[in-house]
Amino acid sequence: MTRLLTVTDLALRLEGGSGRELLNGLTLHVDAGEIVGLVGESGSGKSLTARAVLGLLPERSAVTGTVLLGDTDMATADAATARTRRRNDVSMVFQDPRSGVNPVRRIGDFMTESLRLCHGWDASRAKRRALELLDAVRLPHPDRHYAQYPHELSGGMLQRVMIAAALSTEPRLLLCDEPTTALDVTTQAEIIRVLLEQKEQRGMGMLFITHDLNLAAAICDRVYVMQQGSVVESGPADEVFRAPRADYTRRLLAATPTLEPRTSDVPTPDAPGTETPILSVSDLRKTYRTPFGSSTAVDGVSFTVRRGEAFGIVGESGSGKSTIARMLVGLERADSGSIVHTDLAVAAGRRGRAARLARARARQIVFQDPYLSLDPRRPVGRAVEDVMELHYPGRPGNVARVRGLLARVGLGEQQAQSVPRRLSGGQRQRAAIARALAVDPDLLVLDEATSALDVSVQAQVLELLAEIRAERGLALVFVSHDLAVVQGLCERTLVLQRGSVVEQGATRELLARPTSAYTRLLVDSVPHAGWDLAALAAERTATLGRDADEELTPHRP
Amino acid sequence: MTTVPVERQTRAGRLIRSSPALVLASAIILGVFVLVAVLAPWIAPYDPDAIDLANVYSGPSAAHWLGTDGTGRDTLSRLMYGARLSLTAPLLAILVATIVGTLLGLVAAWAGGVVDGILTRVFDVLFAFPALLLAMLGVALFGKGLTAPVIAVALAYSPYVAILVRSLVLAEGSRPYVAAYRVQGFSGPWTALRRVLPNVSPTILAQSTLNFGYALMDLAALSFLGLGVQPPTADWGAMINESRAAVLAGHPLSAVVPAIAVVLAVVAVNVVGDDLADRLAGRTRS
Amino acid sequence: MVLTILKRLLTLAITLLVSSFLVFGSMYLVPGDPLSFLLQGREPSPEAVAAVTEQYGLDRPFVVRYLDWLGGAFRGDFGRSFQFRDDVTSLVWSRLPTTMALLVYAGLIIVVVGVISGIAAALHRGRALDRIVLVVLSGFAAIPSFVAAIVLIAVFAVQLQWFPSFGAGEGLGMIPHLTLPAIALAFTFIAMLGRITRSSMLDQLGREHVEVAESRGLSRPSVIRRHVFRNALGPITTIAGILIAGLMVSSTVVEQSFGVAGIGSLLVSAVDRKDFPVAQAIVLLIVTVFVVVNAIVTVLQPLIDPRSAAREAAR
C-alpha cells in the first residue's frame, strides 16, 4: 500500500510566555485506501495534528519531528512548497461548514476558486467539474446550488459542498476534522456515506478526527487514541476498542454511552401506579410566526412524568424538544394545551412575587452551554447563595446549605469563590446543577445539559445526576439528541419529529423494538459495528422522503 | 466629530495595548488638568483678563511661563481658567447623554416590539444630526453661549449610547444565564437592572469616555468658531480663535498652547478610557 | 430581497421627513413669537415685517406653513437670506462647488490613508508596523480640525510658505489652496476609518473560511483579497453616511479657518448673524446628504453582504 503520510515524533510548543507543549512526540501513518481514526477529547491535540499535516501551524510555534506528506516534510517546508502540497495532495473537510464557507460568496465561487486560481483552469471547465462534484456528493440540484449563497442551504447540504470542494483538487489524502459533529445523527449518516463512497472511488487515504468513539469504531480501519498531545494507544480499530490496553482508552470506552438495546442495564420503569404524576402535559402547541409564514414548533404533544422518574425527550434539530423544555419552566408560553405541575398550588396565569417564587420551587432547568448559563461576574458560590436568599431570606444556615450543596456536586471552597471563567466545563455544569437544586425542586429539566461536555466529563455529570435523583426522589426531564445517553438514564422516553410525538414508552422497549419507522431510523443512524450505510440510506429515503435534507429556509427554532 | 456607533469587542481585542506607564502618565495628566481647573482661581499667576499692552506676543519668560497673547494676557493663566469650561461643558453633556441613552437603550431592548420600533426610528433621526451641527442649530435658535450647545451635544450623543446599550442588552439578554434568573424566580426588572446592566456597563463606560473626548473637541470647535464661549471668557477653543491673527503674524505660541492642551486632554482620555474598558471587560470575557 | 430594500428606503425617507420637520419646527422652540426671533437684531420696518411674514407664512396655520416650506424645499426655494439680500438657493449653490472640491480632496486622502493603514496594521498584527499605525491613529483621533488648521497654517503657510493660508483659489489653483484645509479635515476621519478597517480585517482574519481557503492552497494575497478584505467591507461601508455627514460639518471649521468661501463658512456666518433661512437650508442640506448616502449604502449592502437582506427580512 502506498504510504501517504508519515508523522514521526512530532512535537509542538508555543513560543513565548507559557511555552506550553501542545503536541508531545506524535507518531502515526496513513496508507492509501485506509481510514485512520484520530480520537480523543478536547485538548488532545487532534485538530492541531491535522493542521500540522497541512502545514498550517500557529505562528510563533516551535516544531520538532517530521511530517512527511509523500516526500515533503510539511513541518519544515517553505511556504511555497507547503502550498503546492495543499493544492495537489491533501485536503481537509472542516467541522463547521457555516463558518468554513465564505458567507458573502456563492457556492459556485467556493467550489471553483481553487481550480481557477491555483490550477489555472478556465471558468467553464471549472464549473463543469464543480457540478460533477456536487452531484457526486449527492446534492439534488447542482445547478441551483451552484448559484446559491451558503445561508440558503442547510447544514448538511453545506457540509457536502465542503466535501465536494475538498475533493476538487483530487487529493490523495483527505483529512476530516470532526466533519459531522455539528449535524443531526440522520444527516451524519448521509455525510459519512458520501465520504466513504468517495474514498472508495478515488482510493484516497483518510485521517478521520473525532471525539465519538462509536463513530470511529464503526468506520475506521486503524485508530490512534490521543490524550493531551500524545498517542496513548494505537492499532486496528476493533482490537483497540474491544481490548484496549491503555488505561485512558479503557476509561474513555467505559464513559462512552453506547446504544445497545439488548442490554439489561437499561432502567425499567415501575409498573404505572395510581399515584398522580408530578407533571402532566396535555396537547401542547406552539407556532412561531416568521416573515416566511408560520412554523409549527410543537404540535399537540402530551405526556406525563411520574414522581422520581427520569423521562427522556429525544429528537433531532427542529423537533421542538428545546421549545418544550423551555415551556416546562415557563420561559415560553404555549399557544394552547396545558402543563400541570402537581403540588404547585398556583393557578397557571397568576402573577406576582409569591406565584413566581412558588413556580421556581416547583421546577428548575439546566442549560446546554455551561459557560453562558452562568452569570460571568458572579462567583458560583454567590450565584447559588443568591437563589437561596431570594427564596429563604435571612434563614440561618443558608450559607452552610450552599456549601453543602456545592460539596455534594463536587465543588470545593476554591471553586465556590471562582467566577465561571476560571472553571472547567464540567465544573461549570456542576455549579449550574447546584444552583438549580438550591430551591429543592420536584422536577429538574435538563436541556441537552451534557451535550457540550467531553465524554468522560459527561459520564461524571450523568453519574452525579443519577445519584442526586436517587437521594432526593427528583424527577428529571432529560432532553437530548443522544439516544445512548437517554437510554442509560431514562426509564421512559418520548420521540419527537417536527413537533409531533412519534412514539413514547418504556425506553428499553422503544429502542429495542421501535414501532415507528422514524424511531427505527434514529436507532439505526447511530454509528455501530456492522453499520450498513447503503441500507440506511434507503431506509432514510423511505422514512423521511427524498427532500428531507432540503431546508432552504432560514434556521428553525 | 462624530463617533462610530458601536465600538465592539471583536476577536481582534483592544485597539492598543497601552503600556502601564502610558496609562499612568495619561491618568496623571488628566488629574493635573482637573486639579488645575478646580484650583485655577487660587493658583493662576495672573488674572486671565488682565490686559497688558506693553507685553503682547511675548515668548516664554520667567514672568510669563507660556508667554502672552495679542493683548498681553498671560497664556498660562488663561489656560488654567479655560480648563474649567473646556472640561466641564463636555463632561456635563456626556453625563446627560449617557444617562438618557442608557435609559432609552434599556427600554428599547427590554420592551421590544412597538416601543423598540419607535425608539429606533427616533435614534435614526437623531443620527442625521452630527453633534457640531446640532450645536450650531442650537446657537442659531438660542443665541451664542454654551447652554444650548451643551444640551444639543447631549442630545446628539444620546442615540450612540442608546443603540450601543440596546445591542449589548439584547446580546446579553439572549444568554441562558438571564433566562436562568427568571426561572429561579427573580423578576424581570430586577434582572435587567441589577444583573444585565452591570454586566454590560464596562463597554458603556468605555464608549462614554471616548464620547467625552469627541464632545470636548466639538464644543471647543464651536468656541473656535466664535459661537460658543464668548470673549473675553477664557476657553481653549476661543483662545485659539482669538490667536489666529497672531499665527498669521508669526506669533503662534498663544494658539499652539491651547491647541496642545486639547490634544493632550483627548489623548489622555482615550488612553485611560481604553485601559478602563479592557480591565473591566476582562472580568466578563470567557 | 427587493422588498426589504424598499422597506429600508421608505424608512430613510421617513427619517428625512421627520428631520426636515425638526429643522423647520425648531424655530418654534424659541420662547417668544417667531416673528421677533426671525427679525432679531434687525429693524422691524413694516416692509421687513411683511417680507418675513410672507416668507415664513406666519399668518397661516402651522401645518400649512410646514407644507409650504417643504414644497419650497422641493422646488429649491428656501426664501431669501437676511444678510445677503439674495435668495438662499443661489447663495448655497454658488458656494457648493468649493465645498465639494474640499470634501472630495479630503475624502480621497481619508480613504487612501485610512484604509491602507488599517489593512497594513491588521496584516502585521502585534508587530512593529501595527504598533506604529495604532499610535499614529490614536494621535490623529485627538487632533480636531481647528487644531490641525492652526498648526498647519503656522508651520506650512507662515513659516515654510509652501502653501497659501487663505482662500480656495480658482480652477487647478484650488489644489494648492485646498491642500492644507483637506489635510486638516482628514485627521480624525483617518483615525476612524483606520481603526474600523483594522478591526474589521482582524475580525475576518480569525474566521474559519480564511483557514479553509488557505488549506486549499490559495496564495496569501488571494486569501487576503477574496476572503478577508472582501468580507471586511461590510462594517466599513456602513459608516459611510456618518463619515460624510461628519466631514461636511467639520468643513465648517476648516473653511472658517482658511477663509474658504464654501457652504461651511456660509453656515457659520449665518448662525453668527442670525440669518435663519440660510442656516436652516444648510442644516437641511447636510441631513439630506446623510440620508441619501445611507440610502445608497443600503441599496449596495446586499451586494456586499448577501446575508444582510435575509437578516433584515427575518427581523
Image (tube, helix red, strand yellow):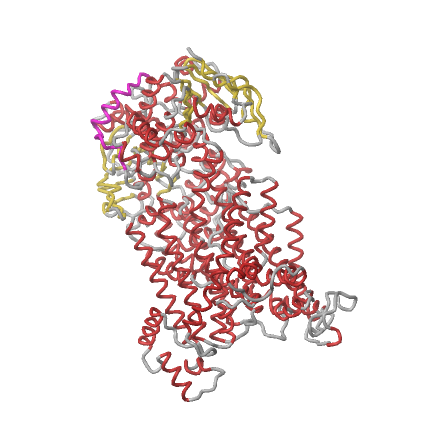
Q: Residue furthest bottom?
A: C46
Read off the magenta span: A529-551
Coordinates of residue C37 in the picture (x, y in percent): 45, 80
Q: Quadrant of residue A181?
A: top left
Q: Quadrant of residue B117?
A: bottom left
C290 lies left or right of A24: left
Q: Residue furthest top?
A: A1
Q: Residue furthest right?
A: B62
Q: Main secondary structure of the magenta part?
A: helix
Task: Please name the residue shown 28% across and 27% down the image.
Answer: A135
Coordinates of residue A499 in the picture (x, y in percent): 25, 38
Q: Is residue C115 above or below residue A180?
A: below
Task: Please name the residue shown 33% across and 39% down the image.
Answer: A149
**Residue B98 visible in image:** no
Coordinates of residue B88 in the picture (x, y in percent): 59, 66
Instruction: Look at the image and say whether residue A545 sits in the magenta stretch.
Output: yes
- Identify which residue, B231 or A168, lies in the foreground: A168
- Identify which residue, C209 or A13, lies in the foreground: C209
